[in-house]
Amino acid sequence: MIRAATLWLTSCATFFPVVAQGAVGQAGEGGFGFLSSFLQMVAALMLVVGLILLTYYASTRLMRKIPALRPGNQHIRVLEVRAMGPRKALILIEVAGEYLLLSSSGEHLALVKQINMLEEIEIVEEPSVRPSFLALLKRAALRS
């Protein structure tokens, strides 16, 4: 990743003097040439893409070094959210190994029940009303 960013920045640094000199040479003749304008645009684009890649690389390295920003360092997980109506929902979360069922209604959040994993939790599969996109693709492939 860093090699790609270095390559982009190096090529931009190489193209900018050539592009600038070509633009100055063309300007004395009464205007910019298409080739010099195109090279200037490509060099500017390469510089911007290189800076984006360099920023992405630096930010991911920084996020790995700061313990609070690591993705595996989460103590609270939202497992499921079910809408029950306009601005009303049930939320199942896990906090330090405990499961809590919360109700949310607009500005109010309340604990409904603390669920022990020793209890039997019945999982009810909802019937799929619409077929999946993969099923549609398979059916289309069989027809042709």
Image: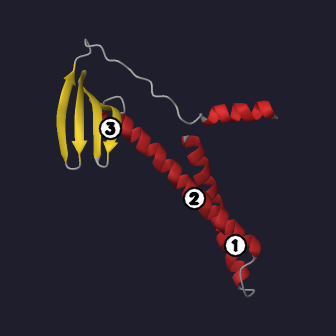
Quarter of the image for residue 15 reads bottom right
Res. 13 visible in picture:
no
At label 2, the amino acid type is: Leu
Query: Which mark is drawn over residue 47?
Result: 2
* Label 3 crowd bin: few (<14), some (14–19), many (20+), radius 10 Å: few
Task: Identify the disc placed on residue 69.
Answer: 3
Q: Which residue is at the far right? A: 144
Q: Is residue 104 above or below residue 10?
A: above
Image quadrant where one finds the C terminus: top right
Please provide percent x and percent y for residue 116.
Answer: 22, 17
Q: Residue at x 71, y 68 (%)?
A: 38
Colour mode of the rendering: secondary structure
The extreme bottom residue here reads 30
Q: Amino acid at mark 1?
A: Ser
- The reply to whether the C-beta atoms of the residues labelled 2 and 3 are less than 8 Å apart is no
Dividing the picture into quadrants, the one containing residue 96 is top left
- Give x and y (percent) for residue 55: 46, 50
Q: Of marks 3 and 1, which one's residue comes earlier in the chain?
A: 1
